[in-house]
Image (cartoon, coloured by chain):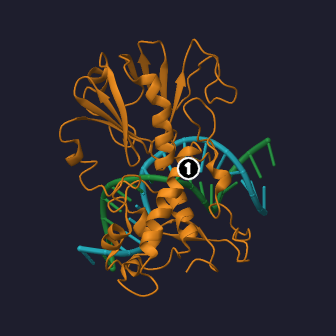
Chain colours: A orange, B cyan, C green
Amino acid sequence: MPELPEVETVRRGLEPVMTGQRLVRVEQNRPDLRFPFPPCFRERLEGQTVLSLGRRAKYLLVDLSSDEVLIMHLGMSGRFTIIDPLQKQKPGAFHHETGGTDLHDHVIFHLESGVRIIYNDPRRFGFMDLHPRRGLETSLHFKSMGLEPLGNKLEGDRIRTLFEGKKAPLKAALLDQSLIAGLGNIYVCEALYRAGLSPKRRAGTLSAARGAMKEKADVLAEIIRDVLTEAVEAGGSSLRDFAQTDGSLGYFQHRFRVYDREGETCPKKSCGGVIKRFVQSGRSTFYCPKCQK
DNA sequence: AAGCGAACCTGGCTGC
DNA sequence: TGCAGCCAGGTTCGCT
């Protein structure tokens, strides 16, 4: 499901409901997701108060009063639903009003307010972990993680340095979480389209110090930030079934210019090209061969 | 050593 | 209607 904008949307949904709340009970319905849950997972959560909710790239970070951080990754199909027994569910919400449980409701957090927060993940590519707050940046999940694209460090110069000498396609380099962390298949396709850059181009060609490519890395850095910011403001993208925590849908998918638009004409007025799809690094790339060079 | 493809899992859609 | 095949927003492993 989720790239950075979707995870940020989830974070914003959970934040007002969870912050300051004590976790009175945690249901864990299976021993593992993508990885086993950490030892004594429930015991280390129950009784703790949520201090704040953060995000790093595609990871959700829940700061606990125990000085541990609950690290959560949604994989491809993970989602959170907030069930407030005092409030009628919005129509279209994933969980029906009886609050019946789904086969893939793997974790349920019970807050002292009575609210339940359900983690559902059919494919189980997501995971949860606990780590002391101190040293989180150097922990397993984060030690080799790349730049935060919405932070202030994503500049053309950084891209030029990171991509220097790389023979991998630009698409693959942008998907590499150890370089820039948070982009996924959709937003890479969209950013490359807006930047007029071919996904097939060697990443190292953005490092040219002079000539026609000189400004391209700067443009790309700005466009990446623009696309992500717009998507966050739109509440992320709802493909298939991704929903916000209250069951409502993001709407950035209506603004896709190339993603999932194979065969359509390029939205750029004077271009007239046709959007193509091909497989690259094992995943679908959508692009306009005419105006992305 | 970088750069591929495969694997991990389930469900939804398409087409025969 | 049934069923096979393909596809999916991510990450990691293992083989060149």
Q: Quadrant of the C terminus of chain A?
A: bottom right
Q: Relative to A265, is A12 above or below?
A: above
* Residue at the (40%, 56%) spot, across then down: A149
Q: Residues within 10 Å of mark 1 (few under 14, many from 20)?
A: many
Which element carries disc 1, helix, strand or loop? helix
Quarter residue A67 falls in: top left
Quarter residue A290 falls in: bottom right
* Residue A152 in sight from this viewpoint: yes
Q: Residue extending furthest bottom? A: A211
Q: Pinpoint residue A40: horizontal percent, then vertical percent.
A: 26, 26
* Residue at the (48%, 19%) spot, across then down: A116
Q: Is A158 left, or right, of A194 in this rendering?
A: left
Q: Amino acid at mark 1?
A: Ala
What's the chain of the residue with tag 1?
Answer: A
Q: Relative to B9, is A104 above or below?
A: above
Q: Is A242 left, or right, of A156 in this rendering?
A: right
Q: Pinpoint residue A248: horizontal percent, then vertical percent.
A: 63, 34
* Residue at the (55%, 58%) spot, across then down: A186
* Residue A105 in sight from this viewpoint: no
Residue occupied by mark 1: A231
Front-most of A100 and A92?
Answer: A92
Q: Pinpoint residue A158: horizontal percent, then vertical percent.
A: 32, 67
Q: Relative to A69, is A291 above or below?
A: below
Quarter residue C13 falls in: bottom left
* Residue at the (56%, 27%) spot, across then down: A102
Front-most of A282 and A263?
Answer: A263
Q: Is A78 left, or right, of A241 in this rendering?
A: left
Front-most of C16 and A38?
Answer: A38
Q: Pinpoint residue B6: horizontal percent, then vertical percent.
A: 44, 64
